[in-house]
Image (cartoon, grey):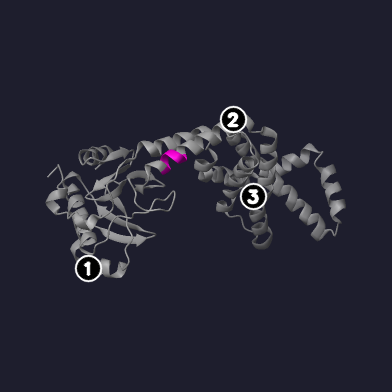
């Protein structure tokens, strides 16, 4: 089983596909199906199940060999073992069982727009990682507002104020790492992911131009933060171990930083920090690489996934295994 077979299968069921994700309708329910690997698929249903324990125990035995179910935050997740092409028969059988149980208990698809929080959804869209009901007017409003913000930023965004905000973000971002180093004498790689995030959002909140400059400044200041950590730690040692006053410690650091030897020593001491910062940039890349243009493109892409959605009353639309038969069977 490979992702191309997955895409072909889901497309023949009327789903749209994007790489390892497919989204569409099963009965009256919006469903997101993800290719987890050669032996596993996952389907997510946006539903509100009032009594999850009752639902689970009534379907548990029927699901043997077809998959496992979990439920959290209005998301019913079905994980199915799909080992080879013949095993695609698992998908329609598992889906039919889940939909049948939802309908038997009168549980409709979640009719709550994630953008406005209101019901009476008139379309479904791939929004916030899940194919779910929403309002087309809300999607259009989101695109319009995002486009307007991008245009305003292009006209009035300021590199200077953005850079100042990025510097403030860098200072805030290094604080958790400094505290763990001083209190626990340990470095946590995950905390280093906060540094580029704080720099990026500091730049953004201070109205910097949201173009490629935002990413470049974020990366440069993230690397510079390794030196900032070393300087702050050096200042702490001067104050705590040598009983220097704050002003004297700052003056001593200022003199020391004029020497190239100190910068070389700090670079050598910071090699592990650079590694963790690189990892932090990798972890935060999806966020820090966002520009005004990508935000508009994302909003447009969400709108493009929308399809008319008659409503969420799934209980009136019974589904049988024959209705969800695989085209490969």
Which of the marked residues, 1 or 3, is nearer the chain's N terminus? Answer: 1
Horizontal and vertical percent for residue 37? 31, 46
Horizontal and vertical percent for residue 309? 29, 45
In the structure shown, which secondary structural element does the residue marked by tag 1 occupy?
A: helix
Pair 2/1: label in front? 2
Front-most of 71 and 219? 71
In the structure shown, which secondary structural element does the residue marked by tag 2 occupy?
A: helix
Which of the marked residues, 2 or 3, is nearer the chain's N terminus? Answer: 2
Is residue 64 in view?
no
Q: Which residue is mark 1?
A: 58
* Horizontal arrangement in the rendering, residue 191 relative to residue 262 (left or right): left
Q: Which residue is mark 2?
A: 154
Mark 1 and mark 3: span between their CA atoms? 49 Å
Front-most of 313 and 53? 313
* Quarter assignment of residue 326: top left
Q: Which residue is mark 3?
A: 173
In the structure shown, which secondary structural element does the residue marked by tag 3 occupy?
A: helix
Which stretch did the figure color magenta?
A: 138-142
């Amino acid at each position: 089983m490979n992702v191309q077979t997955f895409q072909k299968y889901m497309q023949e069921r009327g789903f749209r596909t994007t790489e390892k994700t497919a989204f569409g309708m099963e009965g009256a329910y919006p469903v997101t199906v993800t290719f987890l690997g050669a032996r596993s698929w996952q389907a997510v249903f946006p539903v509100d199940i009032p009594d999850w324990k009752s639902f689970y125990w009534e379907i548990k035995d029927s699901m043997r060999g077809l998959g496992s179910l979990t439920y959290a935050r209005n998301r019913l997740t079905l994980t199915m073992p799909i080992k080879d092409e013949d095993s695609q028969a698992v998908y329609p059988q598992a889906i039919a069982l889940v939909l049948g149980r939802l309908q038997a208990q009168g549980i409709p698809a979640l009719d709550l727009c994630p953008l406005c929080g209101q019901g009476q959804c008139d379309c479904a869209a791939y929004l916030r990682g899940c194919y779910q009901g929403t309002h087309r007017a809300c999607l259009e409003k989101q695109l319009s507002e995002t486009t307007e913000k991008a245009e305003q930023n292009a006209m009035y965004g300021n590199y200077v104020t953005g850079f100042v905000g990025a510097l403030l973000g860098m200072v805030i971002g290094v604080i958790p790492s400094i505290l763990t180093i001083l209190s626990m004498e340990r470095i946590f790689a995950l905390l280093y992911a906060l540094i580029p995030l704080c720099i990026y959002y500091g730049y953004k909140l201070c109205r910097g131009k949201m173009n490629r400059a935002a990413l470049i400044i974020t990366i440069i200041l993230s690397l510079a933060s390794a030196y900032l950590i070393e300087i702050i730690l050096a200042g702490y040692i001067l104050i705590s171990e040598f009983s220097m006053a704050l002003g004297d410690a700052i003056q001593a650091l200022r003199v020391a930083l004029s020497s190239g030897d100190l910068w070389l020593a700090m670079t050598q001491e910071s090699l592990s920090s650079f590694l963790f910062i690189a990892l932090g940039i990798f972890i935060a890349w999806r966020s820090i690489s966002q520009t005004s243009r990508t935000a508009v493109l994302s909003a447009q892409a969400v709108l493009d996934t929308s399809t008319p959605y008659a409503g969420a009353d799934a209980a009136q639309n019974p589904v049988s295994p024959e209705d969800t038969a695989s085209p490969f069977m």
